Image (cartoon, grey):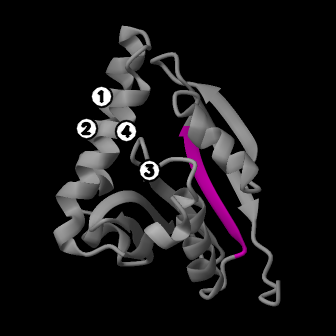
Amino acid sequence: MSEDNFYIRIFNNLDQLHVQDMVIAGLLATAEDRSESVRDGISAYLERSLSEDLGNIYDHYFTDGIFFVAVSDEHIVGCLGVEKDNDFIYRLKRLSVKKGYRNQGIAKGLLDNIEIWTQERGASKLILGTSEVQKDALIFWKKSGFQVVESEVVESGIEVFSLEKDLDLNFEN
């Protein structure tokens, strides 16, 4: 699939259940071959996520952030949101690309849109958190210029990482 076969747009309320189901399915799939404590940790994380942001994307992200979806054949196949951490730092959340659509430029396209949107608002840095369970995501973030600045093992035994990327505010590139 080339970029001609998908497009990126801003999330709307009609997307809620599609995005929510896609993110949940993606995270559950990463834990399939893991220990029971890891699967329990991911289930607890998903429950928290539903009450924090995933259960009401529009109200959560559109105060001081944005949420993009990637669409192919009129189906949502990817998403990425960002929320304001402070005047110069924005936090990325909810990167998800459906299996079968990965490694085709969708995550990069979503990130490119987020970077443009945040730079237009004066952001100098993007931050995010991910875990060892999302191996492909960690590889993607590193290839996209993010650096691990901290890691810790949480009680479920999962190693979690904090990453950041300084944004180049030169728009001529």
- The residue type indicated by label 3 comes to Val
Q: Residues within 10 Å of mark 3 (few under 14, many from 20)?
A: many
**Mark 1 or 4, nearer chain start:** 4
Give the residue number, with chain letter if any, for mark 3. 97
For badge 4, the amino acid type reads: Gly
**Mark with earlier residue (3, 4):** 4
Which quarter of the figure has residue 144?
bottom right
Q: Which residue is mark 1?
A: 43
Label 1 near label 3: C-beta < 8 Å? no
Between the residue at mark 2 and the residue at mark 3, the CA separation in whole angstroms equals 20 Å
Tell me if I can see residue 91 in this picture: yes
Labelled pair 2, 4 in contact (Cβ < 8 Å): no
Counting from the top left corner in percent of width and height, residue 158 is at 53, 22
Residue at 75% of width from left, 44% of height from top?
149
Which amino acid, mark 2? Glu
Q: How many C-alpha atoms fall within 10 Å of the one at disc 2: few (<14), some, or many (≥20)?
A: some
Q: CA distance from mark 2 to mark 4?
A: 14 Å
For the point 57% across and 45% down, the residue is 129
- Cβ atoms at labels 1 and 2 below 8 Å apart: yes
Q: Residue furthest top?
A: 35
2 vs 3, front mark: 3
Instruction: Look at the image and give the residue range highlighted in magenta.
Output: 124-130
Q: In the rendered image, which residue does mark 4 sit on?
A: 26
Q: Where is residue 86, by image quadrant?
A: bottom right
Image-quadrant location for residue 159: top right
What residue is shown with label 2? 47
